[in-house]
Amino acid sequence: MSLNDSWMQRDLSVLWHPCTQMKDHEQLPLIPIRRGEGVWLEDFDGKRYLDAVSSWWVNVFGHANPRINQRIKDQLDQLEHVMLAGFSHQPVVELSERLVNITPAGLDRVFYTDNGSTGIEVALKMSFHYWRNIGRPGKQRFVTLTNSYHGETVAAMSVGDVALFTDTYKPLLLDTFKVPSPDCYLRPEGVSWEDHSRTMFAHMEQTLAEHHDDIAAVIVEPLIQGAGGMRMYHPIYLKLLREACDRYEVHLIHDEIAVGFGRTGTMFACEQAGITPDFLCLSKALTGGYLPMAAVLTTDKLYQAFYDDYSTLRAFLHSHTYTGNPLACAAALATLDIFEQDNILEANKVLATRMAKATAHLSDHPNVAEVRQTGMAVAIEMVQHNASKTPYPWQERRGLKVYQHALQRGALLRPLGSVVYFLPPYTITEEQIDFLADVATEGIDIATRAAISVALAPGAPSTFHDPG
Ligand SMILES: *Cc1c(COP(=O)(O)O)cnc(C)c1O
């Protein structure tokens, strides 16, 4: 038995994996990883995989990056953890100062949690609580976009709209206002991204006009709806949304958990609209992909509405045990150093251009409806017919074929349903981008030519966003 097989068997006898139908592993091998180095992951049999999806969008500077490793090792010898209520420490102060400095003006306070979903919970609770504290308790509801994803905890699921993840739990969810997404994949022929996103704003305007007295906040994934299939839209939408939120006295929550830290071409997506949200949620690449941590930045105005004598019960009494963990803060500080010292955003322009060039030919593929890109994210949408954009039934799991082919060829490409995408670490080379494009092209050919027949169960969710 190979080492891979033996680790796989030990794993499958005790683990329950995330976002996975475990029965799939009767056919689909699980891949135990022994080590990582740069863009490469290596399994126990010595086979290497180029991590084209940054290990679920977290890893920006490669695996086992020597600079991040060293910073964590240094911190480990100093202080591994201390509770953050009543206590503080150097890395959390330094990180907070730096986050305030590099985010848009006006975001002056940082609250930490230990993953993205709980960061979203914090933003929702703070917004709701703010309106209570200032004497407007009627503002309780949230507005979200169709096809959005904000995490897995119950309130975060409530503001999401990827049927696959949320349909089962509907009875548990908060009642939200759902507004059609400005997603430009769906724009009419010949209409620009900007015009389409601007036109789609009418729906948001109408919801805010009618219900603003009941609404605490609007939450969006700026520019890229990640788990919803890397669907993209124009920054004009965010600009219009900021203006409307001001007019109607509604908070704007930017979930930049996936897109923050350079993914869209700017450090934060909100910069492209020239706006400051009331809440900015960060996680994933925050620690360079090393340790779980999220940061929620907000304004002084918000903070002041909670600042009072204890007995008024206005405080935000929310905590997570590992809040502000020093090792995670050290990883985040090392990550920010690399952004600065290596002028990453500038260097990424060359890589983004190469990603466009390497995938351009796929636009002509009969089963590709669109190749779209925002900064360091490229997505290729496979369909039955490119002209009509007729989607594949999700049950056919075409993306899984691409995933399996890529593994054989030494790449980790994990499509979202029928959407093949690259979200690579920023340490990838131009040659490695070309390699990924070759692998994806082969995988798409195989997946779209395959004769697949499946029983289409009635009432099943219409979208499937993970090949698992
Ligand atoms: C991943 C993600 C989350 C959830 O973060 P977790 O750390 O997985 O809880 C929330 N919002 C967006 C946009 C994400 O991509």
Image (cartoon, rainbow, N blue to C red):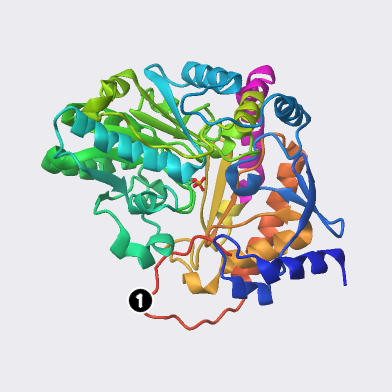
Residue 285 spot, x, y in % from top left: 58, 36
**Nearer the observer, 395 or 36:** 36
**Nearer the observer, 194 or 331:** 331
Residue 380 spot, x, y in % from top left: 55, 53
Number of numbered discs: 1
Q: Quadrant of the C terminus?
A: bottom right
Instruction: Identify the residue shown where x is 40% and y is 58%.
Output: 162
Instruction: Judge whether 389 appears above or below 183 on screen.
Output: below
Instruction: Identify the residue shown where x is 76% and y is 38%.
Output: 64
Residue 196 spot, x, y in % from top left: 32, 42
Assess mark 1: CB under 8 A from ligand 1? no
Asked if residue 353 is among those painted magenta in the image, a careful observer would answer yes
Say whether residue 229 is visible. yes
Query: Where are the magenta residues, as a range?
Result: 336-361
Looking at the rendering, which quadrant does residue 364 occupy? bottom right
468 vs 37, left or right, is left
Instruction: Identify the residue shown where x is 28% and y is 39%.
Output: 218
398 vs 196, left or right, is right
Q: Which residue lies furthest to the front in this view?
A: 311
Residue 221 spot, x, y in % from top left: 41, 41
Kindly identify which residue carries mark 1.
459
Assess disc 1: are there few (<14), some (14-19) or many (≥20) residues with their C-alpha within 10 Å of its C-alpha.
Answer: few
Name the main secondary structure of what is drawn in magenta: helix
